[in-house]
Image (tube, rainbow, N blue to C red):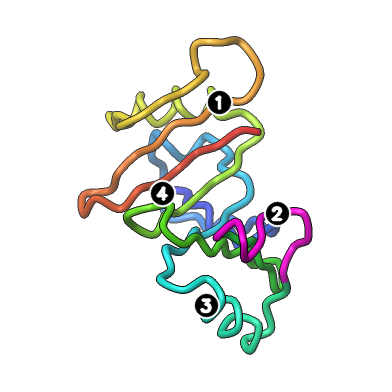
Amino acid sequence: MKTFLFTLGLTISTIAFGQTEASTAEYGDFSVSLTVEDITASYEFYQKLGFKRIEGFGGIDEKWLILQRDGITIGLFQGMFPKNVMTFNPLDVRSVHKTIEAAGLKPIMTNGLEKEEGPCYFILEDPDGNPIYFDQH
């Protein structure tokens, strides 16, 4: 029986489909970081969809913003990433990393995992080269 975690913002739902190695790790909050051409135009578009800016996280002048609506989190980033990025914020990235590696997946980048505590992250790419970022603040 696999277990997949589907997350929208701060809400986590679990759907059972069988069991896999990576299903034992809690992935935490989820967000999508969108690469945008024009931060102002993108911000205006997502405002029309009802998304509100989270104050204190970026700004138009900084070329990045974090928006939320109904527990859904979207980051808008102009000129920062080559592709859109899926981001998970588990409470224990080191545990998720061990579980993912046990499933036979290898990160393309890691930082801070060798320490016993504190901020750290790792990045995977799916078969199509889409980055998946696991970040612990």
Counting the numbered discs, the total is: 4
The x, y position of residue 63, in whole percent, is 55, 60
- Residue 95 appears left or right of 80: right
Q: State the mark number for residue 57.
A: 2
**In the rendered structure, which amino acid carries the disc numbered 4?**
Gly
Residue that numbered label 3 is attached to: 42
Q: Closer to the N terminus: mark 4 or mark 3?
A: 4
Residue 122's place in the image compared with 16, above or below, is above
Compare residues 115 and 2 and report the one nearer the observer: 115
Q: Name which residue lies at 62% across and 25% down.
A: 119
x then y, percent, for residue 31: 56, 57
Callout in the foreground (4, 1): 1
Residue 18, disc: 4
Q: Could you tell me what secondary structure mostly forms the magenta stretch?
A: strand
Asked if the residue under mark 3 is in contact with the one under mark 1, i.e. CB atoms within 8 Å, the reply is no
Tell whether position 130 is magenta: no
Residue 89, numbered circle: none
